[in-house]
Amino acid sequence: MRLLVIEDDDAIRDGLERGLRADGFTVDSCADGASGLWRGIDGGYAAIILDLLLPGMSGYRVCEQLRGVDPSIIDIYLRRLRTKLHPTEVENVRGLGYRIGA
């Protein structure tokens, strides 16, 4: 199973990659929203793990753009590691049709 990790923090991204590979996944990754968008559009991913706070293009915007290209993309797990999501953010993400993860 092929996964995409979009995370700007090197340590977090590396940890996610190592853990997912250890569990048998094939993992691609990138460190900013624009790169993640292009990789996501290229497709072939079973799931995308996406940070919300990215340089250049936010995780919210990446979700909107991916949904605009392919409405069938539903397995995108949004994460914001350091702080808790505000209730308004939760509703915005749910409105896009995506899942929220830790």
Image (tube, rainbow, N blue to C red):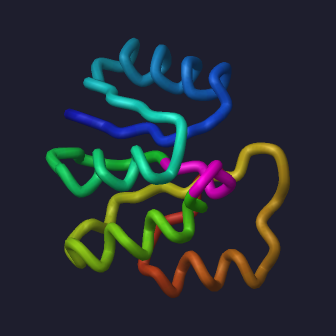
As displayed, is residue 53 above or below residue 61?
Answer: above
Task: Give the quarter of the figure containing the N terminus.
Answer: top left
| Residue 88 spot, x, y in % from top left | 75, 84
Q: Main secondary structure of the magenta part?
A: loop
What residue is shown at x 23% (from left), y 34% (from top)? Answer: 2
The residues colored magenta run 50-56
Q: Is 57 on the left or on the right of 91, as rendered? A: left
What residue is shown at x 33% (from left), y 27% (from top)? Answer: 27
Q: Is 76 on the left or on the right of 94, as rendered? A: left
Which quadrant of the figure has residue 66? bottom left
| Residue 53 spot, x, y in % from top left | 68, 54
As displayed, is residue 81 above or below residue 8?
Answer: below
As displayed, is residue 68 above or below residue 42?
Answer: below
Q: Is 21 on the left or on the right of 100, as rendered? A: left
Which quadrant of the figure has residue 23? top left
As displayed, is residue 38 above or below residue 67?
Answer: above
